[in-house]
Amino acid sequence: MTGRFRSNKPKRTHDTKTGKTYDARNKAGQAVASVEFPDLDTGDPFVWYQVLRRCPPRRFIDVETKRGIDTHGSLM
């Protein structure tokens, strides 16, 4: 990638409820949505944020920093 998005690489994310680690946050959102929230469209590029709003804070952990992720997608 170039320009504005050159540092936008996938961020590994751990789901504390299932114990699974995903290669990217969007993949985590798609997986959780398909099982727990069937009303969400897993093809939506923003499904990760919809899942975050429905799950408790710190359910997802950023693997690199070991910090929790809040309901808005920010590290805690």
Image (cartoon, helix red, strand yellow):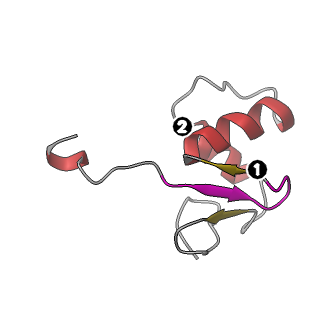
Which is more N-terminal, label 1 or label 2?
2
Q: Which label belongs to residue 46?
A: 2
**Above-or-below relation of 71 to 24:** below
Residue 17 painted magenta: yes
Q: Residue furthest left?
A: 3
Identify which residue is drawn at 85% across, 38% down: 36
> Where does the C terminus fall, quadrant-wise?
bottom right
Q: Residue at x 49, y 54 (%)?
A: 11
Structural distance between the alpha carbons of marks 2 and 1: 13 Å
Q: Secondary structure at mark 2?
A: loop
Q: Looking at the picture, tell me which residue is in the foreground, 58 or 21.
A: 21
Q: Quadrant of residue 38?
A: top right
55 to 67, vertically: above or below? above
Classify 10 Å Cα crowding around label 1: few (below 14), some (14-19), many (20 and above): few
* Direction from residue 17 to residue 13 in the image, left or right: left
Callout 2 amino acid: Phe
Q: Determine crowd level at label 2: few under 14, some 14-19, many 20+ residues with C-alpha closer than 10 A.
A: few
Tell me which corner region of the image, top left, top right, bottom left or bottom right, holds residue 67: bottom right
Decide whether residue 46 is among the magenta residues. no
| Residue span colored magenta | 11-19
Residue at x-position 22% and y-position 40%: 1
Residue type, label 1: Arg
Secondary structure mostly taken by the magenta-highlighted segment of the chain: loop
Q: Position of residue 5 (x, y in %)?
A: 25, 46
Mark identifier at residue 76: none
Q: Nearest the camera: 71 or 18?
A: 18
Give residue 48's quadrant in the image.
top right
- Judged left or right of residue 46, residue 61 is right
Which mark is on residue 54? 1
Residue 35 at x, y percent in the picture:
84, 33
